[in-house]
């Protein structure tokens, strides 16, 4: 999809940046605000460091950390300030962005959601994780299915989240819907590393599409995320 690591991309090439973000500790609204600013800063840094980048992808839990808190004060909405700042950052820096957030659910537990915003700041894709990692994760399963959109440079783009990628039907559904690139944002810890790697490869190989996969990194003092970004053709 690109040449020389994005420095000399082809006319239809798509340069994707995978952010192996330090695992944050987010337990208060002020910490959520600070982490939002951190992500916004990194959107700008991605553009400055590699002007040819088309899409920057943040891992699952990049905004909320791994506390699994369902505190209403920490939950986000599509029309809330966090998403508003992400939209502004993408528009300002003329770059597409993929972001993770825990979304407020008025009728039950929050959703584990992912969004894709285009380089004009428009929300283009909204996905709710279909397979929460039960019993560890408290999130309500999504019911909206998989969306495939026209992404940067006209590529057909899909998004799944973490444990979704362990089920071959998820990648196959993305491919059936025409995806050329499937993003997988994750928050896995080290014991899952081998499963993470071979499913990323199998999802690409069996479905003839590129998978771009990124996981949180580091420790928040309790949880140790494994890091790792993989692009598989």
Image: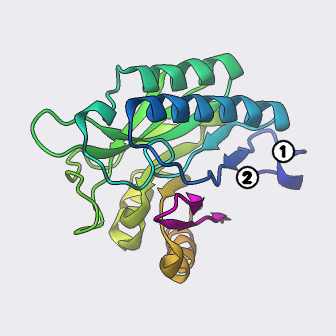
- Name the residue that disc number 2 marks: 1
In the rendered image, residue 97, in percent from the top left (x then y), is placed at: 58, 35
Q: Is residue 120 visible?
A: no
Q: In the rendered structure, which segment of residues is drawn in magenta? A: 214-230
Q: Quadrant of residue 46?
A: top right
Looking at the rendered structure, the secondary structure element under dot 2 is: loop
In the rendered image, residue 120, in percent from the top left (x then y), is placed at: 58, 18
Q: 130 or 79, which lies in front?
A: 79
- Name the residue that disc number 1 marks: 9
In the rendered image, residue 67, in percent from the top left (x then y), is placed at: 37, 54
Q: How many marks?
A: 2
The tag earlier along the polypeptide, 2 or 1, is 2
The C terminus lies in which quarter of the figure? bottom right
Which residue does the image show at 59% across and 42% down from the upper left?
A: 155
Q: Quadrant of residue 168?
A: bottom left
**Neighbourhood count class around disc 1 (C-alpha, 10 Å): few under 14, some 14–19, many 20 upward:** some
Q: Is residue 99 visible?
A: yes
Answer whether labels 2 and 1 touch (C-beta < 8 Å). Answer: yes
Drawn side of residue 90 relative to residue 173, left or right: right
Drawn side of residue 211 relative to residue 76, left or right: right
In the rendered image, residue 48, in percent from the top left (x then y), is placed at: 82, 30
Which residue does the image show at 62% across and 51% down from the upper left?
A: 21
Q: In this picture, is 74 found above or below 85?
A: below
Which residue does the image show at 70% across and 22% down from the upper left?
A: 93
């Amino acid at each position: 999809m690109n040449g020389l690591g994005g420095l000399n991309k082809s006319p239809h090439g798509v340069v994707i940046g995978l952010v192996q973000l330090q695992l944050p500790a987010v337990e208060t609204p002020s910490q959520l605000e600070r982490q939002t600013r951190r992500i916004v800063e990194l959107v700008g840094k991605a553009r400055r460091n590699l002007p040819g980048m088309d899409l920057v992808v943040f891992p699952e839990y990049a905004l909320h950390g791994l506390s699994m808190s369902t505190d209403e004060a920490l939950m986000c909405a599509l029309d809330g300030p966090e998403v508003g700042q992400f939209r502004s950052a993408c528009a300002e820096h003329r770059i597409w962005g993929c972001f993770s957030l825990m979304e407020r659910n008025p009728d039950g537990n929050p959703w584990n959601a992912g969004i894709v915003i285009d380089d004009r700041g428009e929300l283009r894709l909204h996905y709710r994780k279909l397979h929460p990692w039960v019993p560890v994760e408290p999130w309500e399963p999504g019911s909206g299915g998989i969306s495939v959109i026209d992404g940067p440079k006209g590529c057909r783009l899909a998004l799944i989240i973490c444990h979704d990628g362990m089920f071959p039907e998820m990648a196959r559904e993305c491919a059936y819907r025409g995806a050329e690139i499937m993003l997988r944002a994750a928050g896995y810890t080290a014991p899952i590393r081998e499963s993470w790697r071979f499913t990323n490869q199998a999802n690409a190989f069996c479905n003839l599409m590129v998978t771009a996969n990124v996981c949180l990194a580091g420790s928040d003092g309790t949880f140790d995320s494994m890091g790792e970004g993989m692009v598989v053709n």
